Amino acid sequence: MLYVRRDGAGSIVSVSLVADEDHPEAAEAGSADVQRFVGRLGGANPIASTDLGLVRVIEDLIDLLIARDLIRFTDLPDAAQEKLMERRSMRRSNRSLDLIPGNNEVL
């Protein structure tokens, strides 16, 4: 959870990891307002905004190649195997917590 300070127009001007008198409002890291604030800090990078979607495509592509016996999971480097297993575990736990069927948003 993040805590934010807003200006008179309602835009985020400061973010903190702890709530204090300067940052009284709680906000989710993935919220549109927080993402806009972060984008202003680092400058707009159009490629970075597509990275998460591309990661999902690559995961699905790897799963398809494995399902069609074109590659084996063990053919992948150890580090790639670990990352894929970690993401699969997170996706599985997110689905088990999904109270609204059909909601595939990344948390």
Image (cartoon, rainbow, N blue to C red):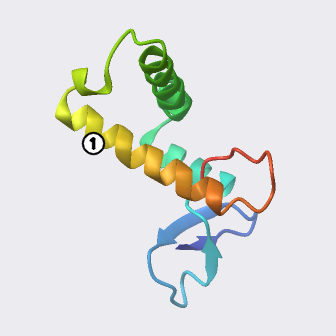
Q: Residue at x 56, y 30 (%)?
A: 53
Rendered image quadrant of residue 33: bottom right
Q: Is residue 103 above or below residue 6?
A: above
Please tell me how many numbered marks the rendered image carries.
1
Residue closest to the far bottom: 21
Q: Is residue 79 above or below residue 102?
A: above
Residue closest to the far top: 70
Q: Position of residue 85 (x, y in %)?
A: 36, 43
Q: Nearer the viewer, residue 104 or 12?
A: 104
Q: Nearer the viewer, residue 19 or 82?
A: 82
Q: Provide the residue designation for mark 1.
A: 82
Q: Is residue 30 above or below residue 65?
A: below
Q: Residue at x 73, y 69 (%)?
A: 8
What kind of element bears circle 1? helix
Rendered image quadrant of residue 98: bottom right
Q: Is residue 83 left or right of residue 97?
A: left
Q: Position of residue 75 (x, y in %)?
A: 23, 20
Q: Residue at x 70, y 44 (%)?
A: 104
Residue 45 can be seen in this image: no
Q: Residue at x 60, y 74 (%)?
A: 5
The disc labelled 1 sits on which kind of residue?
Answer: Glu
The residue carrying pointer 1 sits among few (fewer than 14), some (14 to 19) or many (20 or more) residues within 10 Å by Cα, namely few
Residue 19 can be seen in this image: yes
Q: Nearer the viewer, residue 105 or 5?
A: 105
Figure quadrant of the C terminus = bottom right
Q: Position of residue 73 (x, y in %)?
A: 31, 26
Q: Position of residue 25 (x, y in %)?
A: 64, 79
Q: Is residue 107 left or right of residue 82?
A: right
